Every structure is written in C-alpha cells, then in structure tokens.
Amino acid sequence: MPSPLSLSNPTPETLTPSTSDSEYTGAMIPLSTPPTPLSVRRTPRENAGIPPDRYGFLHEIAQFVSYSHISPVHRAFIASLDTVSIPKCWQVAKGDPKWKAAMLEELSALCKNKTWELVSLPPGKKVVGCKWVFTVKQNPDGLIERYKARLVAKGYSQTYGIDYDETFAPVAKMSTVRTLVSMAVNEG
C-alpha cells in the first residue's frame, strides 16, 4: 500500500472523487500512485564530525582554549582526569589488578547486603542482564582516591507488574532522615 505522504497532485489520469459524492470517505487513495520504497539507504557523509566553516573552527580548538584563568590546583585536577583510562567492559578491567580488586569489593558488598537471592527462573521469563560501570574517584587535589566498580542491572528491559513489583535503592530521603532525627531528639 503506498504511503499517504507520497500522494501526487491529481492529474487527468488520476481519478479523484468529489466531496459531493455520497461514497467519498476522505480516505480514498488514487489508483495510479506508484508504490514508494520503504526505506532509502543513504551513503555516509564525507564531512561527518567536521564542523562547517561558518562556525569559525578552521583549526584545532586547543589553539583557542586557555587555562590561564584557572587556579593551579584546578589545573592539576583537570590534567589528572586523563591519567587513568576507564575500561569499557569487564574483560579489559579484569586484566588490571586495581580494577579487579574494585570488582571483588563490589561483589562482596552485594553479598554482605543480601542484595539478591538465587532462585530458579520461572517458565516463560527472561533473565535481566547486568553490566559493570567503572569510575575513578579523585580528591580535590586530583590524586586518585579509589577505583570504583558498580554492577548494575539493565532495568530498562523490565516491565512493571510483569518483571518486578517493588524497587529498592540504598538511599534515604532527606524527609525520612529529618523525621527520624526529630523523633530521636524528642525521645532523648
């Protein structure tokens, strides 16, 4: 069936009913409209990633950026951001002892907190996958404080009421903390 967007203007060969016709429903498509392709594949652009000349970036942006107005402490911090490469997958991370230790620390914390329990998969259900997210924690001086690894569920693949009924996050709301503190002060 041709796309309604590809309809051409009526020509003598195309029959278009008049609005006074009793059988006209407003959804009729002329019979002589040629079918249109579903998708047209485009070739990749040769200038992809290159800004146009109208923006004034004729050369590397580094020639126009200055760190002279930044304090020495912040300059050291900015320079230290690129000193450690953050792995994109666990296969790369397990080769580095620092990242491997961070992964083991995360797994032991998950076991200690009893975050999950091992159960058999119900019939007709799919397992929710997980992935590792790696970050480097730095202090204000730019020195590496610790390597952090998180094992996170791919929750975007779940549907509420089908795959899960309740959520859990190890974060307390500020209103809850205030209530508990005021209760403790009033009792003590």
Image: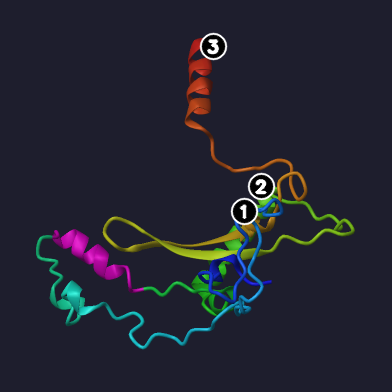
User: Where in the figure is residue 166, as x and y percent of width and height?
Assistant: 70, 40
User: Where in the figure is residue 173, as x and y percent of width and height?
Assistant: 51, 33
- Asked whether, in this view, residue 170 is left or right of residue 73, the answer is right
Q: Which mark is residue 180?
A: none
Q: Quadrant of residue 31?
A: bottom right
- Circles 1, 3 touching at the beta carbon (< 8 Å): no
Residue found 64% across the figure and 59% down from its top: 154
The residue tagged 3 is 187
Q: Which residues are magenta?
A: 70-83
The residue tagged 1 is 109
| Three-letter amino acid code at the position of disc 1 | Ala
Find numbered disc 3 in the image and state the secondary structure of the residue it sits on. Answer: helix
Instruction: Pick the residue in front: 157 or 80.
Output: 157
Whichever of callouts 3 and 2 sits on the residue coming sooner in the sequence is 2
Find numbered disc 2 in the image and state the secondary structure of the residue it sits on. Answer: loop
Alpha-carbon span between mark 1 and mark 2: 6 Å
| Three-letter amino acid code at the position of disc 2 | Asn
The residue tagged 2 is 113
